[in-house]
Amino acid sequence: MRALTLPIAAAIAAVVASAAAARADGLVELAAGGAIPLAEDDYTDAVDNSVKFALHAASVGERGVGVDLGLDVTPVSLETSQFFGLEASAWRFRGLVGARGQWPLGAQAVGFVRGGAGVDVARYAVSGSLLGQSVDNSETDVGLALEVGGGVGVRLGGVLLSAQLALPIALHFDDDDPNDPEDFDLEYTGVDLDFLFAVGTTM
């Protein structure tokens, strides 16, 4: 009897999982917009308004709650990108895992909120010529990423068009090493306000 019970239980579990998956509302979207630095002073003094690109994927169950995944990249606009014949550049890459809540707003519209945590990868590079010497230095630091956001969207068939606001936070702890002339000070807390427009496909 026990040998027969195990296959039956496995079959029931498979059916339940399949039904839950069928009820899930899947979404994959591409977003683009702008990031406005808000805090802290060291961050806002160094960073200007920047363009941002993001990829989100979510799966929301029948109760309106589910998993949200995010990847984004920001070619950071610096307040000072050229100095003494040198050119500086910065990039920011983020990966987030979190939760998403979604609810209907009429027949075709939806509202949603999301939050997550993950990694924030900051890359800073300086290149050029200084006093006749070639300079080509860069540093990459991995910090902690936190984010909350939300928005509203309109369904057009299988397409979801949405406008979103988000508050991404980056925590980095790599202080400058005074004994290493090629080491950059990447110890900072950065807070931005993101304005994003997204096009997604629902599944």
Image: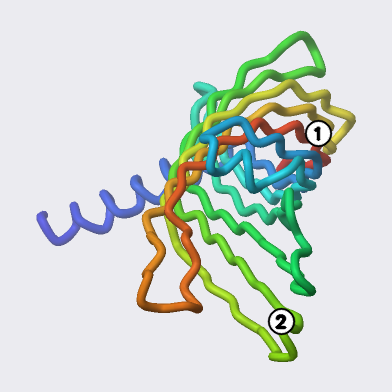
Most distant residue in the left direction: 2
Colour scheme of the rendered structure: rainbow
Label 2 neighbour load within 10 Å: few <14, some 14-19, many 20+: few
Vertical arrangement, residue 92 with respect to residue 108, above or below: below
Q: Nearer the viewer, residue 139 or 102?
A: 139
Q: Amino acid at mark 1?
A: Leu
- Is 63 left, or right, of 11 in this rendering? right
- The quarter of the image holding the C terminus is top right
> How far from the left and from the top, in percent, is residue 107?
80, 12
Q: Point out which mark residue 96 bears.
A: none
Q: Which residue is mark 1?
A: 160
Vertical arrangement, residue 179 with respect to residue 105, above or below: below
Q: Nearer the viewer, residue 39 or 91?
A: 39
Quarter residue 71 falls in: bottom right
> How far from the left and from the top, in percent, is residue 52?
75, 47
Q: Point out which mark residue 130 bears.
A: 2
Q: Amino acid at mark 2?
A: Leu
* Secondary structure state at the residue bearing disc 1: strand
